[in-house]
């Protein structure tokens, strides 16, 4: 019996070799990602390259605390009851799609500087350009402060929680209304900022 030859099939159509679909990265997406990455490294690189001296940080921290006390009612009494206060006078955030932020500050205990720290974090989402903010983190419990100081790199949301203070216009703060172990305040040129989170921010001790 004569058997006919089966038609030659395309080897790529074999069920043992499934089709692979490639999705090339568009030029605009690539350029946006590249630009955001370069901007991120430029901001952080410039900040670390021009790291402030201890004296410069102290001056900026004192100025930030003056602005904080002037702009928020009851701030002086509130800070006086704190076990420790971590102040970052200038935290710079920049990015296009992918962003990051960096700042240097000081930890005060009993009104005196005991250590210097930096803060850094990265974020993904809609963001364009750069902005600067001031961060004040208040430790209301000694155990929370001790854990922070004894850590080798402390991350908010992992090693401890920082509650963002949300005060209405003209409202005052006190230790009874803000009864969390750690409370954070973020403010810019227009006052306190609320649509933010501390989660993911890392704090590392500096040698100054």
Image (tube, rainbow, N blue to C red):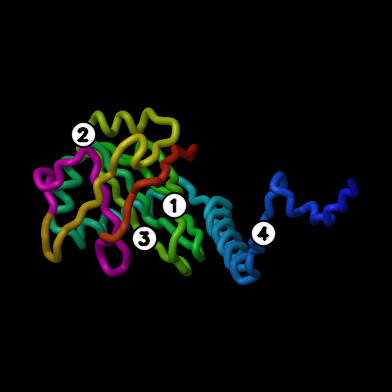
CA–CA distance between discs 4 and 1? 41 Å
Of label 3 and label 2, which has the lower sequence position? Answer: 3
> Are the residues flagged by discs 3 and 4 in contact, CB closer than 8 Å?
no
Judging by the rendered image, the residue that carries numbered circle 3 is 133
Q: Quadrant of residue 66?
A: bottom left
Residue 55 seen by the camera: no
Q: Nearer the viewer, mark 4 or mark 1?
A: 4
Q: Nearer the viewer, mark 4 or mark 2?
A: 4
25 displayed left or right of 104:
right
Q: Quadrant of residue 113?
A: top left
Residue that protrudes farthest toward the bottom in the picture: 28
Judging by the rendered image, the residue that carries numbered circle 1 is 103
Of label 1 and label 2, which has the lower sequence position? Answer: 1
Q: Residue at x 37, y 51 (%)?
A: 88
205 displayed left or right of 160:
right
x and y percent of residue 154 in the render? 40, 37
Q: Residue at x 32, y 52 (%)?
A: 197
Q: Residue at x 28, y 33 (%)?
A: 145
Q: Which residues are magenta?
A: 173-193
Of label 4 and label 2, which has the lower sequence position? Answer: 4
> Are the residues flagged by discs 4 and 2 in contact, CB closer than 8 Å?
no
Residue 151 seen by the camera: yes
Q: Which mark is residue 22?
A: 4
């Amino acid at each position: 019996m004569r058997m006919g030859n089966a038609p030659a099939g395309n080897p790529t159509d074999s069920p043992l070799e499934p089709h692979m679909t490639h999705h090339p990265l568009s030029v605009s997406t690539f350029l946006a990602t590249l630009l955001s990455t370069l901007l991120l490294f430029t901001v952080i690189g410039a900040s670390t390259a021009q790291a402030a001296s201890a004296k410069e940080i102290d001056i900026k921290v004192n100025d930030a605390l003056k602005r904080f006390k002037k702009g928020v009612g009851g701030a002086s009494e509130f800070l006086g009851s704190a076990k420790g206060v971590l102040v970052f006078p200038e935290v710079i955030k920049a990015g296009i799609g992918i962003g990051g932020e960096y700042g240097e500050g000081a930890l005060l205990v009993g009104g005196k500087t005991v250590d210097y720290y930096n803060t850094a974090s990265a974020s993904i989402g809609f963001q364009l350009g750069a902005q600067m903010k001031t961060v004040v983190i208040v430790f209301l419990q000694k155990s929370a402060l001790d854990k922070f100081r004894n850590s080798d790199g402390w991350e908010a949301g992992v090693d401890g929680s920082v509650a963002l203070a949300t005060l209405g216009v003209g409202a005052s703060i006190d230790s009874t209304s803000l009864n969390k172990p750690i409370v954070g305040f973020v403010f810019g040129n227009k006052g306190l900022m609320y649509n933010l989170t501390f989660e993911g921010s890392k704090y590392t001790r500096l040698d100054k």
